[in-house]
Image (tube, rainbow, N blue to C red):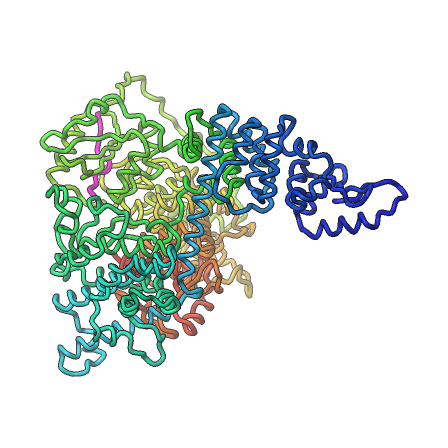
Amino acid sequence: MPVVVGPVGADHGPAVAALAQLLQSGSDGVTAAGAGIVLSPGFVSARLHGVRGDRRDAVLAAVRLLGLEDLHRLGDRAGVLVALFGMEATKPLAAAASRAIAEGRWTALQLASAASGVLGAEQLVHLLTVDAPALDPTPRAAASTMAAHLEQILAPYPRKRRLGLLLDLWQQVYSHQERLRLRRRRRATQGRQSRLEELTTRYRAYDDAQLIEQIRRELGHDPSVAEAARWYPHTWQATMFMRRTLADALAATALARTAVNVGDHGVVQGMNRSTALLTAAARSLSSDEAGDAARRVPGLAGLPARPGCYVRDLAGQLGNPSEPYVRQRLTRAADYAEIILDVATDRLLEFRHQLGDWSAGNLRDWRDSVGFLTHRDPAQWAQPPVSGDRPTLMERLEARPGTAPAEEETAGDLFWYAELADALALLKGHDQADVEYGPHYPYVVCSPVPDDDQQLEPSLGSIPSALAGAAQLVSFGGRPSRQCRTWPDLTGRLLADLGVTERLTTTFRIPEPLLAFDGAVLPGTQARLEFARNARMLAQWATYMGNCIASLPYVEAAEQGKSALVALRDEGGRVVANVELEPHARGWRVNELRARFNAEPDPDLRRRILAWAAALPSSVPDEPAGPPAPEHHPEPRPATRRRADRAFQEVSGPLARLSADALALEDTSDALLTLRSLYDRRPAGGADARAGAPVKDGGPAADAHAGPGPDRDALPHTELVTALRRLSADRVERLCRDELPSVGLAALWRATAVRPLEQALAALPAAHRPHATEPGKHPHPVGPGEGPDPAGSRGRPQLALLLLDAPLPGSLRKLARYEAIAPARSMELVARRIRAAVGRLARAGDPVLALQVARHADTAVLCSLVVAATSWPPDPRLPTVAVSEPGKTSMPGFPRSDLEDPSGPWQHALPGAVELGADLDTFRARVAAEGLQVPVAWLGHGGWNALWQRAAR
């Protein structure tokens, strides 16, 4: 608390008034009061003894408030210098500090004061006088805190190196702030409020009108609803539709790139830089087509349906652009790009078997005019071409050395798709989109989420934040390397030294017999064997192969020497297959063998790999035979008196036997393996146990039976489900979030659908269903969708309580702990808790879950999640969009589905939705009023139709 200090009995009124005026400056005034500012003759400001604060921070705040003219109010200037720079302050340092104060270079003064403990006086003078660009101020940054961080980070370096690192940090922060300002200017070219939904409606209406017109021309009359539904385009018609979509994609790319140029350079220079783009894109839309697309439709947005209309308008402005005119036509560039990405995805999926002619078409005219518009190298583009067995663009260019990419590229290579995504990412403030090769089209994320390593990188938003982040890495265990000469090198070394990235560099334990084969040619082929030495190699393989071989279970097994991971590279160095080898008593066996995108490898290659693996020498030493283990006989159970609980006597035996049978089923074993991979993230044996097996679509269990595995009936399920049951709700939620990418959402949902106790209750014979409920009393109302009502529990309603995650009445506690009933009930509760955790993640808009839904959900989990999301109140963390008309139960997309179909996926999903936290009454009411609601983050590019088609595969 600031106070006034002065002689007793003197008039303190002017001093109090001066202090009040000082405090009006906000937090700087409060801090500055601790510097001892002269308020009036004989009176100075101060802070109470014991109040938190540092004199250096107080003097810096006071200097900022008083300026050079009133600096005398802090007392002797030498004392001020000592407070700022310590006892080694010199006259040149005082002169340099005075110039910095006079010129208002507060960031430099603050950094010099903070660095006075690690730099000499001459270096501080250099830091204060160097011609460095101005940085944005950092409010509330304390020099004392920065000083502690600098000491922690720079202490291992010689003084000369310290100054160089600080000056490089200054430049890095300036460059980062410049990038942020550039991003803000780019975003400012777009409208403040998105009109994506209404513009999408406008485009779809135009597209539907074109489709109806095509049907009318073919039939010779207006089609009926039935005729329109039965109509399917010929190949030439699909080609025509796709050509129009490609023209729209090129126009949307030109529009987005022009918006970026205008944001970067202003209207005049930005338009000049976009001349070639606008001119080339304008040629793809005729004046008649532009007029048709721009014609207003009553009830729809007044914007043109196609982006080419605005491109033509802007092309007409080249040479003498009007700023308001240009900015008005660029304001929806991002919306158009989003729409065309979705439409292109729909077309590629819908017509993928009819696009052979379109796919082979070239883009030479476009490339001759604009070139390639992204930093991506076309020579490294490995996306499978559309509708055909042609090699990728990368493979074709390798086969024809010296050929220009523009000469070899075709429309079906979909490089233009990535360019459109990159243009949209630039508008959203990112350097480029994340692009992952897919079997039918590239998966793109235009607002990439930083990975875990990037999130640990110290922020360059300001010097204080950068120092704080680096100091945190040191406190985590990172050791600054004395060889670092730049700030990125320093932070990179700190990150590499941490345990969080240790797995990328930890050397795998490759068993001795296999090391001799590293780099060798696979017998009978031209493919070379490459053994993974660390997780970084796995990550590089997975990026190209489109599988999950870099996931945690694979890494842990390789680190422990329990498996060996192999890539087979062809003569060009390209990975053609991944192999997982596991040791056994007689040698090695192939546990997983997959080609790209988890496809089956060439049969001849597969045969030769299996033969090679079978001939590998064993790494398991032969152990001498020991004496046979003594046969163990369980002790006889003591006789007990007849229990008074007749219900327990009648039900416990049959229910325990049925529970044991249910636990022994193959579905239960598979579910337990998935739960084990979720819990301890270790391989449980064979390929089926791999949480991250390279089965990208649908998770590890989607196609996990590629090789032999251990006897899964012997899995100690009791310990596993008991351990999972004891976890707190927060821990279960964290486990689900952390392990979803490796376990897979669809696999986890299938595992939690296995309910051994529910099966046992349903199979309980009627003779063992005692009737002991008191008249007029019902233990718990279990309505539709609220929980299971197995047949076996109908005769005794209390038994249904065993399936609920709630305290049990005394009459059921003994039964719940009896033999196989105990693990069966634990598995029931674990499944419910995992689904509740998934529901909480969904409701919070978790990006990890959103990515899993968009790419790897099946209809079972997708329907349950959508039902739950529709029933939840609107939440800014989870924005949704309607994908069906209000009151309609028929859902869009193929295959067809209906909310009320009793045998369809939506009705089957209702119990699961309740376990996620859905309110079915609210769900039905909202569907009737607003339509089915789907979170925007789950849709991705392609919209609902593409999401539903992927889930139904």
Residue drawn at x 47%, y 35% is 167
38 vs 464, left or right, is right
Q: Nearer the viewer, residue 693 or 50?
A: 50
Q: Residue furthest right?
A: 9
* Residue 849 drawn at (x, y percent): 40, 51
Q: Quadrant of the C terminus?
A: bottom left
**596 magenta-colored:** yes
* Residue 387 drawn at (x, y percent): 15, 56
Q: Residue furthest bottom?
A: 221
Quarter of the image for residue 601 reads: top left
Q: Nearer the viewer, residue 612 or 764?
A: 612
Q: Is residue 912 above or below residue 925?
A: above
Q: Is residue 598 above or below residue 883?
A: above
12 vs 704, left or right, is right
- The answer to whether residue 442 is visible is yes
User: How many numbered marks have been drawn onto this rendered protein structure?
Assistant: 0
**867 magenta-colored:** no
- The answer to whether residue 817 is visible is no
Q: Quadrant of the N terminus?
A: top right
* Residue 347 drawn at (x, y percent): 22, 63
Magenta extent: 587-597
Quarter of the image for residue 120 reads: top right
Secondary structure mostly taken by the magenta-highlighted segment of the chain? strand
